[in-house]
Image (tube, helix red, strand yellow):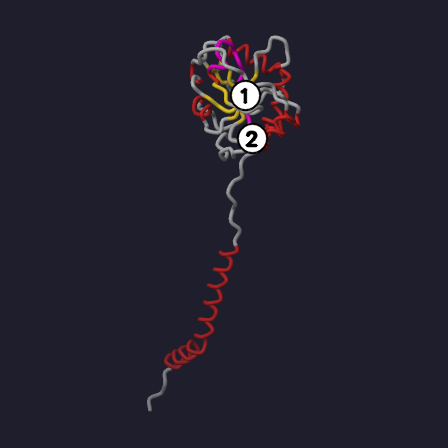
Amino acid sequence: MLPVRPTARVGAMNASRLRAFRPEIVTTVVVVVLAVVAVVALWPRSSAPSAPSAPSATATAAPSASEAELAPLRAAAALEPCPAATGAGRGPLAGVTVPCLGAPGSVDLGAALAGRPVLLNVWASWCQPCRAELPVLAEYAARPGAVPVVGVDVRDDPRSALKLLAGIGVRLPSVTDPDDALRSALNLPPALPVSYLVRADGSVAMVDPPVPFHAADDVVAAVERLSAGTAR
């Protein structure tokens, strides 16, 4: 009989050990795969971004509310009447008809603002900077010689909007824009709040940069600048 070479003996031993450990290797691989699957399944997903508190005008579309729901909220808010038509509408707002927030009915905004300068302020109840700016605008509107201020509540629940105005004591006349008619006419930027001076000739100038007003004097300065046609 030929002697078994050491290398052959070692190879045979390794093969024998491999056969002995193969079930353990397979089991280990299966356990590792299952562990990886479990980790992937339990790994926290990042949630979809919520609507920003300094929000955009691209928030979800406004829900509808019945007149029965709105009536007590309108009474509590006691907003000033929405403007009535004073002439033929001109400029980008001509033909834009939107619902009044404080009372049933709609407003032909171009015709209602014709022939006089008016400051339009676009806001929403979910917009935190808007909440701080609205009282400033109300203070400005109460000053002698101030141009009328009309609020435009966009992409909002009218019930939430009325509750906010009642809570902060702001009674500015306001309209809503559920069909995005005014949003399209003015090509609103994504961030709120934003204000526009509607001039007597129907032309519209945005307050730029569109940052919230922090004092009534800031509103005065912006209106004077835009009235002079020196908007930046």
Residue placed under numbered mark 2 in the picture: 67
Q: Which residue is drawn at 58% across and 18% down?
A: 81
x and y, in percent, of residue 198 in the image = 49, 14
Q: Is residue 191 left or right of residue 95?
A: right
> Mark 1: which amino acid?
Asn
Q: Which residue is drawn at 54% across and 31% down?
A: 156
Which stretch did the figure color magenta? 111-123
| Corner quadrant of residue 129 | top right
Is label 2 in a helix, a strand or a loop? Answer: helix
Q: Given this view, does label 1 or label 2 mark the residue nearer the observer?
A: 2
User: Dot 2 surroundings within 10 Å: few (below 14), some, or many (20 or more)?
Assistant: few
Q: Does the magenta stretch include residue 58?
A: no
146 in relation to 182, above or below: above
| Corner quadrant of residue 19 | bottom left
Observer-nearest residue: 129 or 183?
183
Residue placed under numbered mark 1 in the picture: 121
